[in-house]
Image (cartoon, rainbow, N blue to C red):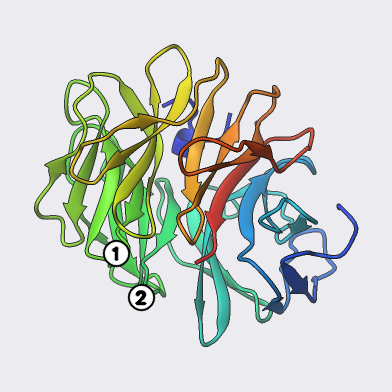
Amino acid sequence: MRSPILEGRFTRFARGKVAVCCLLLCFISCKEDLQVGPVEDAGSPPILFTSERDGNLNIFMMGSDGSDPIRLTAHAADDFSSDWHTDGYGHTIVFMSTRDGDHEVFAMRTTGMWLQQLTDNARRDGFPRWSPDGSQILFTSDRDGDLELYVMDADGANPRQITWNRGEDIGGAWSPDGSEIVFASTRGSSREIYFVAVDGTGVVRLTNNDVFETGRVAWSPDGSRIAFEAYRFGSADLYVIDVDGRNEVQLTDHPADDRYPVWSPDGQQIGFTSHRDGDGEIYLMEADGTGLVRLTFSRGLDVIDSWRR
């Protein structure tokens, strides 16, 4: 991995009216933490992202056009790699944080001041992803000595290991029906993309390229394609492939790293993070790689995390 925190760790207010969300912020006014208050939708689904624009890594939200980024956490520790789920209580965000001294998974609800630590382990737990129905959370942990995939209940109970491998299993993403998980693994001669059932059975290899395929893997909302990143020509570029392993298409081709693909909820676009401006910004393109648009313009690192379903 390129960095020890984000798939090891990430390599490092706007004013105005929010175009896609109407946000009523209820911040706790203490330097240790800020949490967002009630959120009401008024347009297209917003984007969660991690940024170090204020000095360390925290969770932000912005419109899907890049408008009006709003800070959701403010802690002396790093908060990053977030995902959210919408249910009868509103929007619940899970994220990775170092606020207890090591890497753990936390959850917070945007309908009020509620924060819960979901994991408590001496090793690193992180990169959480909600199951489509919100009943489970996929996460990565090295509690058995190397990075493996685990699933736990939404309240942090019943963590169970679903991969067992001496290499690293990372970047997991749920299938739209919640039955399978796609991930990157070094269990072969190179890092490749695999599928596994949620109960840990039926591991199937998707790619066989003998190159370094790493970082986040993303399943399209319609279940037909997988987006991933690969180091094939000296830098990371983004690719998509059908779930049967056919029709691989390279979407980006730039000497700087393009990483962390995220599908739009309708599957028509892909957001990603690129270092082509020098410090890591968030970009958007059509699902075929055309129509590139830059969404963030900050001096600190910005990494796209989740585009709400």
Q: Tag 1: residue type? A: Pro
Q: Is residue 224 visible?
A: yes
Q: Tag 2: residue type? A: Ser
Instruction: Identify the residue shown where x is 28% and y is 67%.
Output: 177
Q: Is residue 5 visible?
A: no
Q: Residue furthest bottom?
A: 88
Say the numbered circle drawn on residue 159.
1
Relative side of 160 to 252, left or right: left
Instruction: Identify the residue shown where x is 46% and y is 26%.
Output: 237
Mark 2 crowdedness (10 Å alpha carbons): few <14, some 14-19, many ≥20: few
The spot of residue 58 in percent (x, y) is 68, 50
Relative side of 259 to 282, left or right: left
Q: Nearer the viewer, mark 1 or mark 2?
A: 2
> Is 235 placed above or below 50 here?
above
The residue singled out by tag 2 in the image is 135
Q: Earlier in the sequence, mark 1 or mark 2?
A: 2
> Is 91 placed above or below 304 here?
below
- CA gap between label 1 and label 2 equals 13 Å
Q: Secondary structure at mark 1?
A: loop
Instruction: Identify the residue shown where x is 65% and y is 75%.
Output: 110
